[in-house]
Image (cartoon, rainbow, N blue to C red):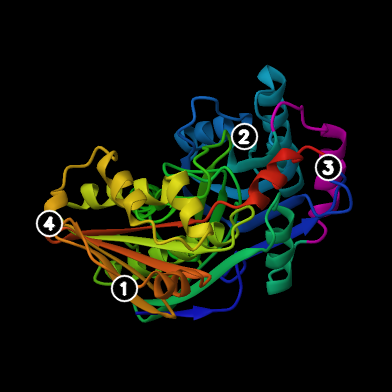
């Protein structure tokens, strides 16, 4: 129903992007921009942390009060979080600066920050950076890559994806970029994700679509159990594909939703694969649950367990930790009817049947679990619902990275 294409946030028509090193970080890109000359309907989802960074508060205000936006400005290296009234003024001032360059209203600019908490933005540096970055805007894949590089913190690689889907027999594109490596946990994590599309869709339908999509994508990942102050997903839709207005009643709505969900799921999985110090990518599927929320809760509980993560780090088939994490999740299921499987490219083994342990070859299990991608499946036999969560192992390197993060 959709096809993968090259690129990121500039894959859709009408979007320009750029990324530069303005001086917030030493010798690394740290300022990014996404811009559409055509006004965009937009949607956002934000951290559940009670301590919300200034840019999160600004963006929430823009979503409440503005019908359209043109631009997203992002800085890395400084979170502008826990910075009080000055932080709020700086977030608005950043939006005003970029709005002035494009001749748009301040409330038509979204801003995001990521980095160290508790330090005010270096506004003189930001102002000079904005003056420079607007000169670099382009529609190329290289421009999208520059932007994707500029939003990184402890990430080890950029995260981009783009797809094309037919709507009214017209090619509609959806592109995205994300950052995230540590402080990743369900219900939004230390992550930023930016999605652009040239589809024509109302703000209300776009917001509803995003709210639904994150439930099975960004809210189903865990690296280390921490949730940040700046977590944000923003979506822009500028209508440049010239399709008829998309809505749930449109015949091509299911195809568009499928493509949109794919972009978010792939970005979410890339965040987990880049988990700080991670050596293994874990996919946990719960099948046969009585309802979707039960399956989600159980799957998230497993990938969020530090004991499960360390077992995978050691390639240890300690299935009891998985069973235990399911048991304390708060979701109701019948342990006496549960099957459990491990799999990788090296094979598949069943370790639990109807709640009772099965004998298995420990050496074979270790060989399977030594692979970089591990699949774990729990079958409940309580119903037809299923859900998948993604996580990673927890390594010595994670402690090293976070022990000297500010240095």
Mark 3: which secondary structure? Answer: loop
Whichever of callouts 1 and 4 sits on the residue coming sooner in the sequence is: 4
* Residue 3 at x, y percent in the picture: 44, 81
**Who is closer to the viewer here, 250 or 51?**
51
Mark 1: which secondary structure? Answer: strand
Whichever of callouts 4 and 3 sits on the residue coming sooner in the sequence is: 3
- Residues packed near mark 4 inside 10 Å, few (<14), some (14 to 19) or many (20 plus): some
- Residues packed near mark 3 inside 10 Å, few (<14), some (14 to 19) or many (20 plus): many
Q: In which quarter of the image is residue 119?
A: top right
In the image, the segment drawn in magenta is 117-136
Examine the rendered structure and indicate whether residue 82 appears above or below residue 174.
Answer: above
What residue sits right under mark 1 in the picture?
Answer: 349
Residues at circles 3 and 1 in contact by the CB criterion of under 8 Å:
no
Does residue 131 belong to the magenta stretch? yes
What residue sits right under mark 2 in the picture?
Answer: 55
* Residue 197 at x, y percent in the picture: 50, 64
State the CA–CA distance, disc 3 to disc 1.
50 Å
Examine the rendered structure and indicate whether residue 264 appears above or below residue 241.
Answer: above
Residues at circles 2 and 1 in contact by the CB criterion of under 8 Å:
no
Q: In which quarter of the image is the C terminus?
A: top right
What residue sits right under mark 3 in the picture?
Answer: 24
Whichever of callouts 2 and 4 sits on the residue coming sooner in the sequence is: 2
State the CA–CA distance, disc 4 to disc 3.
55 Å
């Amino acid at each position: 129903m959709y096809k993968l294409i090259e690129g990121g946030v500039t894959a859709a028509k009408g979007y320009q992007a750029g990324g530069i090193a303005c001086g917030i970080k030493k010798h690394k890109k740290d300022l990014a921009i996404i811009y559409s000359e055509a006004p965009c309907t937009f949607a956002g989802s934000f951290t559940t942390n009670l301590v919300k960074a200034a840019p999160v508060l600004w963006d929430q205000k823009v979503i409440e009060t503005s019908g359209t936006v043109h631009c997203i400005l992002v800085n890395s290296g400084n979170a502008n979080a826990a910075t009080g009234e000055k932080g709020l003024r700086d977030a608005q001032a950043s939006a005003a600066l970029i709005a002035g360059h494009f001749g748009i209203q301040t409330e038509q600019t979204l801003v995001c920050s990521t980095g160290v908490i508790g330090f005010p933005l270096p506004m003189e540096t930001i102002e000079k950076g904005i003056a420079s970055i607007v000169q670099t805007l382009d529609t190329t894949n290289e421009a999208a890559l520059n932007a994707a590089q500029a939003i990184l913190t402890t990430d080890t690689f950029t995260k981009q994806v783009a797809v094309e889907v037919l709507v009214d027999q017209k090619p509609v594109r959806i592109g995205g970029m994300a950052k995230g490596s540590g402080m990743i946990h369900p219900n939004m994590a230390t992550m930023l994700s930016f999605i652009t599309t040239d589809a024509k869709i109302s703000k209300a339908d776009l917001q509803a679509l995003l709210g639904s999509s994150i439930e099975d994508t960004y809210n189903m990942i865990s690296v280390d159990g921490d949730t940040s102050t700046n977590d944000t997903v923003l979506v822009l839709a500028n209508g440049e594909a010239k399709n008829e207005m998309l809505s749930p009643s449109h015949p091509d709505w299911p195809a568009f939703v499928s493509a949109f969900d794919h972009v978010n799921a792939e970005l979410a999985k890339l965040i987990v694969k880049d988990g700080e110090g991670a050596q293994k990518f874990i996919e946990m599927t719960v099948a046969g649950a009585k309802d979707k929320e039960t399956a989600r809760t159980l799957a998230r509980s497993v990938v969020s367990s530090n004991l499960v993560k360390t077992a995978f780090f050691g390639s240890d088939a300690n299935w009891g930790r998985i069973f235990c994490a399911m048991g304390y999740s708060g979701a109701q299921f019948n342990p006496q009817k549960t099957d459990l499987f491990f799999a990788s490219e090296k094979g598949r083994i069943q370790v639990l049947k109807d709640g009772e342990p099965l004998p298995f070859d420990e050496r074979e299990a270790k060989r399977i679990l030594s692979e970089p991608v591990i699949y774990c499946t729990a079958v409940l036999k309580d119903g037809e619902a299923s859900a998948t969560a993604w996580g990673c192992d927890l390594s010595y390197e994670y402690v090293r990275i976070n022990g000297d993060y500010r240095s």
